[in-house]
Each structure stands twice: as C-alpha cells, then as structure tokens.
Image (spheres, rainbow, N blue to C red):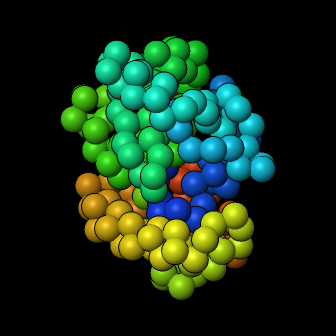
C-alpha cells in the first residue's frame, strides 16, 4: 500500500509545480487524478490534470457515493473518486494529490490515512501576482480567491507540515518536502 501525500495551498500557491517535481524525483510514484466540474484550462489534459465532467454528472456521482471526498469551490465541484484512490495506492509506493483544505478534512473524517503538506505564500500580494500571471481569470475572481486563501491558511492548522513556498525558491520547497517523504517510503 502506497503513501498518500496531500499537497494543498491557496490558488496560485505552487501545488502543480511541486507535485510535478516530486513525481520526477521518486520512482514508482503517481499523481492521483481527481475529478472536477470546472472547464479545462488551455494547458490542461483530460485524465492527467483532472477528470473533467459536468456539474450534473458530478452531482450524480455524489449521490451514488463515488467520492471519498468532494467540495464546491469557486463555482465548481472538485473531488476524489474512491476507486481511483484505491487503485493508485495498490499500484504505487507514493501517490500525490493536490487538494484544498476542506477536501483534506473530509478525507480525515473518512479515516483515509495521509501525509499533509500545506504550501504557504510569503504574503498575499505575491499570491495575487501568481494568480494574475496564470491569466484567464477576472479581477473579481482574483479578489474572491484571495479571500478564500486567507480562510484556507487559517484552516490549515491541522496539516502535518506547513512550508513557505517562497518566490524564486521552488527547488528549496521541493527539497524540504522530499526530505519528509523519503524516510516514510523507505519504511514501507
């Protein structure tokens, strides 16, 4: 059974960059592909970044009990399908996922063991610039995401680790997380 590692951060906090680097660093590791009702972004790939489904289909899956956890965030559903998680943990030594704080708390309530890491921004102004740099998002949504970020940072108190992902120091962030994970995989 693999080690399940949750990487969380506010929008624009570096989750994808950290996970992609860790996947290159650890053999027999995989990203858990979660499901969302949000539209694809230009850089997204179906089945690699997310499983993209309609809101109606997402609600049907909720009613069918298909999700280990799910949440409604920024006008869209996001969730972890139970079957995808179980398959990944059987196949890989390390399973990484990006998930927001409510999803992490729901996994904890469901009794699903995990190691949780929350990436903190240096400050909200830097976080705002990261979100703006992505493009494709209105000023109103940026303001909403920054308000959500403040709540998420407060709600991350129960994470196993909190690491500041400083601007221009991504490799240091990745090294810190790798040092946490490595001995836990060696024990398995």
- Left or right of 155 on screen, residue 67: right
In-front residue for pair 10/35: 35
Above/below status of 55 relative to 84:
below
- Left or right of 82 on screen, residue 26: right
Q: Can you name the residue that lies furthest to the front here?
A: 56
Q: Residue 57: horizontal and vertical position, in percent?
A: 48, 25
| Tally of numbered discs | 0
Q: Residue 89: horizontal and vertical position, in percent?
A: 49, 21
Q: Can you name the residue that lies furthest to the right here?
A: 42
Residue at left offset 52%, top offset 45%? 98
Residue at left offset 68%, top offset 28%? 47
- Left or right of 178 on screen, residue 42: right
In-front residue for pair 32/129: 129
Q: Can you name the residue that lies furthest to the bottom here?
A: 125
Q: Residue 103: horizontal and vertical position, in percent?
A: 36, 43
Residue at left offset 32%, top offset 21%? 63
Q: Quadrant of the rendered structure where residue 152 is? A: bottom left
Q: Residue 183: horizontal and vertical position, in percent?
A: 49, 40
């Amino acid at each position: 059974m693999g080690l399940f590692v949750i990487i969380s951060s506010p929008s624009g906090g570096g989750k994808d960059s950290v996970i992609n680097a860790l996947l290159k660093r650890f053999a027999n590791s995989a990203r858990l592909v979660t499901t969302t009702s949000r539209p694809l972004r230009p850089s997204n790939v179906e089945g690699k970044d997310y499983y993209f489904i309609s809101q109606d289909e997402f609600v049907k899956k909720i009613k069918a009990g298909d999700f280990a956890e799910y949440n409604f965030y920024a006008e869209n559903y996001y969730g972890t399908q139970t079957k995808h998680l179980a398959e990944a943990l059987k196949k890989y030594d390390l399973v990484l996922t990006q998930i927001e704080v409510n999803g992490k708390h729901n996994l904890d309530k469901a009794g699903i063991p995990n190691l949780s890491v929350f990436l903190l921004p240096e400050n909200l102004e830097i976080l705002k610039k990261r979100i703006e740099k992505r493009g494709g998002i209105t000023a109103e949504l940026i303001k909403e995401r920054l308000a959500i970020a403040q709540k998420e940072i407060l709600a991350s108190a129960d994470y196993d680790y909190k690491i500041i992902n400083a601007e221009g120091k991504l490799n240091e962030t990745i090294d810190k997380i790798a040092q946490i994970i490595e001995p836990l995989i060696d024990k398995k």
